[in-house]
Amino acid sequence: GLVLLMKSTKTWILPLMLTRNMKPPKSPKEYYLEEIVTGDIDTIHQWGHVVATSYGMPNVKRNNMSPSTFFGSTYENVIHGTNLRQFVLRSKNISDKSKNVVATCTLYVNDTKTIGCMFNVCCLKNHRRKGIGKFMSKVIIYHATVMGCKQLLLEASPKGEYVYKQLGFVQSEEKPNLSGTFVSINIGTKSCHWKLLLILIEYIIQYKNTLQKCCLIGAVVFFAMFFIEHY
């Protein structure tokens, strides 16, 4: 699906270097890490719930589908473990494995395995302030390094800048052509309709006239919602 976040985010870069003694980060107490595998529908939907809830999306159903269900369903048929790697953190204090995912993080690397992108570092509200967000970020840094990536990129809001500075990220000197607008297309989508939509958005946001830009983006978003509903 299409994700269009009209937020003032900044691009951050972390240079990576593989060291012989590099070890995976240890999970916080009372939690354990797990990587999502292709076809694990239950975990994928729990991942969607954590992401949608953490982003504060209203729990309103559209076409009998909540944001949590929608986020999860978009990844049901996506191949995991190659370019895309998704991780969840489970609580040891919740015995029901269908309800114990409390945090998420996502790594996507390019085909040459030289550049990685970090997404969806999310944690449920009741489990925050325990270092979980920082731990999940370290998980991505570790796996991106082991996979041979030279750089790790992310888009961070002002709220997350402090944590990423601590981890060694530096703000990119090159300003994105998207003027602070972050555009993402679900990497599992192969439809040419979505590729066309992305091209349109990238073209529109280069307009200097703010009013014209907003009107055109509004029209494109309307088309996207119509497409989701009918196709």
Image (tube, rainbow, N blue to C red):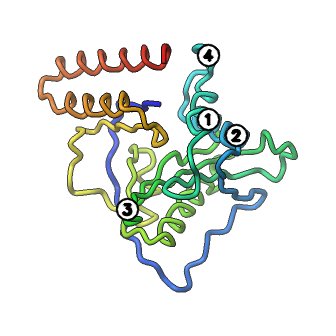
Amino acid type, residue under disc 4 in the picture: Lys
Does label 2 or label 1 sit earlier along the sequence? 2
**Distance between mark 4 and mark 1 Cα atoms:** 14 Å
Looking at this view, name the residue that lies furthest to the right: 95
Contact between labelled residues 1 and 2, with CB atoms less than 8 Å apart:
yes
Which one is closest to the eye, mark 2 or mark 4?
Answer: 2
Does label 4 or label 3 sit earlier along the sequence? 4
Which one is closest to the eye, mark 3 or mark 2?
Answer: 2
- 8 or 118, nearer to the observer: 118
Residue at numbered disc 3: 115
Crowd band around label 2 with a 10 angstrom C-alpha radius: few (<14), some (14–19), many (20+): some
Crowd band around label 1 with a 10 angstrom C-alpha radius: few (<14), some (14–19), many (20+): many
Report which quarter residue 56 is drawn in.
top right
Which one is closest to the eye, mark 4 or mark 3?
Answer: 3
Does label 3 or label 1 sit earlier along the sequence? 1
**Distance between mark 2 and mark 1 Cα atoms:** 8 Å
Q: Is residue 38 above or below residue 45?
A: below
Q: SS at mark 3? A: strand
Image spot of residue 27 (x, y percent): 69, 63
The numbered dot on residue 61 is 4
Amino acid type, residue under disc 2 in the picture: Ile
Residue at numbered disc 1: 72
